[in-house]
Amino acid sequence: MPKIQITKELKKKLILILALIFLLAIGFLIFQRKKEVSLKEKEGTIWQNLATKLKIIENPEIYVEFSKEEFLPQKMTALDKAFYFFNPNDNWLFKFENGKKEKIETKEKIKMTTPFAKNSILALRMSEENRLTLFENDQSKETFSLKEPYPEFEINDFSAFRQNLYFLDSKRGEILKYSFPPNLPKIWLNPKTQKPIGAKSIAIDGSIWILTTKDNKIEQYFAGQYQKTLEINIFPEPKNFEKIFTSFDLPYLFILEPAQKRVIVLEKTGEVFAQFQSEKFNDLKDIFVSDKTIYLLNGQKVYWIKF
């Protein structure tokens, strides 16, 4: 091989090239460092913004309270300013309206309820036949036996929207639709769409919002089709979401999380609007929202929060 003669001119060129490579490397490292700092600052700003949306309530206001001898409420629903409380082990409802409590006999135990039409609620009975009773003006008006769409149909949650009833079967990942009065059921989800297997809770505002067991995710369905999963950036990070609540006239989704003694208010895009936390939210069981007020059933008490 011929020898390469390194002249003074070639040495100068090599030194310039090496210097240029060195400067480029230094510039790249500085750029990367600034980028990392910028990302950290941006992330810090995001978490700081989320933290400012967290309101700690030392002494939440009590709306109503039951003594242990009086009643052990487990769930609640409401019509305007009338609240109805029940325990699946009892054969009655407790109504609270205008500062007065009233016991309403139901003859059978109740598994779950939902507001329906004006002055009406629907109650799913604690029976193998999936019996549904319409209470109108606090009187049992009519009871229906739901026809099963398939064997081993299991109801985990249900809600009403515009004279239609929607039942969640978490095990099958199906939503069943009944027109009222309930007759033949219809499988609401498209057979080819994503299924909410293992879901915990549903809420309806035109879309159906599903709270999933896995990863505390919220899925939106519309016209029988999966639409999206909300990306939720929140601090403190979720541990175990329990219930979702919304309605046609509410612009937000409300998430109950007893594990962290809080209720989360989300925009329907997934952005955090607010969250309320209190050490006194130590036995959260249910939530209802009306007229910019959140009602929280916590043990024997109902707290209320204006937002």
Image (tube, rainbow, N blue to C red):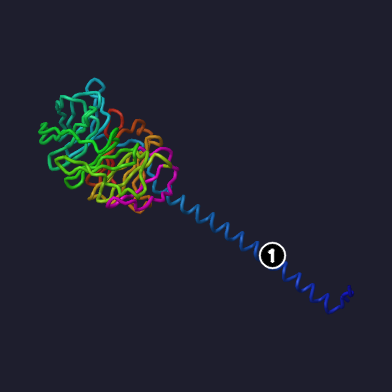
Residue stretch rendered in magenta on the structure = 216-242
Residue annotated with mark 1: 25
Residue 138, x across and y down, in percent: 12, 33
In the rendered image, the vertical position of residue 17 relative to residue 132, given as above or below: below
Report the side of 112 relative to 193 (left or right): left
In magenta stretch: residue 270? no
Report the side of 31 relative to 135 (left or right): right
Q: Amino acid at mark 1?
A: Ala
- Quadrant position of residue 170: top left
Depth check: 44 or 106 in front? 106
In the rendered image, the vertical position of residue 47 relative to residue 173, given as above or below: below
Q: Residue at x 39, y 45 (%)?
A: 217
Depth check: 128 or 13 in front? 128
Residue 61, x across and y down, in percent: 28, 36
Residue 20, x across and y down, in percent: 72, 71
In magenta stretch: residue 237? yes
Report the side of 140 relative to 280 (left or right): left
Circle 1 crowding by C-alpha within 10 Å: few under 14, some 14–19, many from 20: few
Q: Which corner quadrant holds the N terminus?
A: bottom right
